[in-house]
Amino acid sequence: MKINTTLQIGEFHTNYCEDFLVVAQIATKEKLIAVLDGCTMGTESVFASMLYGKVLRKIAKQFFYEEFYNSIEIPLEGKIKAILKELFKQTNLLKNQLGLDINELLSTMILGVVDTENSRADLITIGDGLIFWDGELIEYEQNNIPDYLGYHLSENFEEWFQAQNQKLTVENFKNLSISTDGIFTFKDLRKGGRQKPETEIINFLLVDEENSQYENFLDRKIRFLKNEMNQVVTDDLAIIRLMN
C-alpha cells in the first residue's frame, strides 16, 4: 500500500500553516492517519493542530510497543475509541501543566486506523473535512462553525464518544484519501482567469494516479496546479492518500 501526503500553506496565510498531518505505525499491520486544521480565530491557531498531532504520534508509538512487547492487541473496531480516550487524557494533562485555555486548543480532526493488509479503515471526523474512497465522497461541513475537540476535553469521554455521528468504516478500498477543507479553496488569482470546478480539482488530486511512483506525488500535483493551471490553494491544506 502506497501512502502519499501533502501539507501546504494557503496563499492567504502569511506566517504559519495551521494544518498538520500524521502517518504513524500503530500495530504491525496498521497505520494511524490524521489530518488536522487549526482554527484561524483561535489563539496561536497553529499550536492546537500541531499539539494534537504530536500527541497522536506518541499514542501510536505507545500502542505499537504494547502490542510488540506485551502482546496486548486492541481490535481495529475499538482502536479509534481507545486512541481518542488516550488523546483526551494526555491533552488534559498538558492543558493543566501549560495553563492552556480552550481557545488555544481549537482544531478539527479526521482520525483513522487503517488495516494495511486487508484494506480496511475506521475513521472519525471531529469538525469538518473530506473523506474520499473509490469514487465515493463524504464532505463533513459545519457552516464554518466546526465542533472543535477542544470544546469537549472536560466532558465525560464515554458520553461524548457515544454522541459522535461522523464515524465511517471503509472496507476493501483501492484508493482512500482524507483531507482538510482547504481542498475546496483552489482559485485562479490571475485577473480574468478561469476557475476550475471543485470536482475537477478533487479528481486530479484524489483519483488521478499519473506519476504516483514518486514519493512527492501529491506535492508535484499541487505545483502543477499552480504553475500550469493557475490554480492556487488559498487556505491551508493537508491530504493523506492511500492506494493499493
Image (cartoon, rainbow, N blue to C red):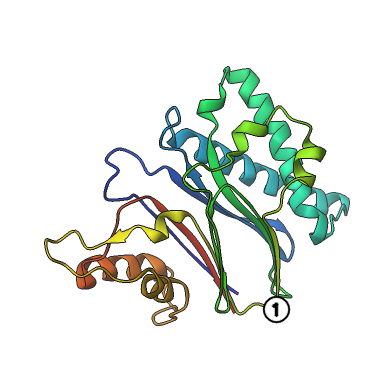
Q: Which residue is mark 1?
A: 172
Which residue is outermost to the right?
Answer: 71
Which image quarter is the N terminus in? bottom right
From what the image shows, is residue 6 above or below residue 66? Answer: below
From what the image shows, is residue 86 above or below residue 98? Answer: below
Query: Residue 46, percent across and down?
Result: 43, 37
Q: Amino acid at mark 1?
A: Asn
Left or right of 182 on screen, residue 244:
right
From what the image shows, is residue 200 above or below residue 20? Answer: below
Callout 1 secondary element: loop
Which residue is outermost to the front?
Answer: 143
Which residue is outermost to the left?
Answer: 191
Q: Nearer the viewer, residue 38 or 142?
A: 142
Which image quarter is the C terminus in? bottom right
Res 227 quadrant in image: bottom left
Residue drawn at (74%, 63%) of the image: 28
Q: Residues within 10 Å of mark 1 (few under 14, many from 20)?
A: few
Query: Residue 226, percent across and down?
Result: 24, 65
Residue drawn at (25%, 68%) of the image: 195
From what the image shows, is residue 212 above or below residue 104? Answer: below
Query: Residue 109, percent across and down?
Result: 57, 48
How many numbered badges does the structure rendering display?
1
Residue drawn at (45%, 31%) of the image: 42
Query: Residue 114, percent across and down?
Result: 68, 64
Which residue is outermost to the bottom?
Answer: 210
Res 102 quadrant in image: top right
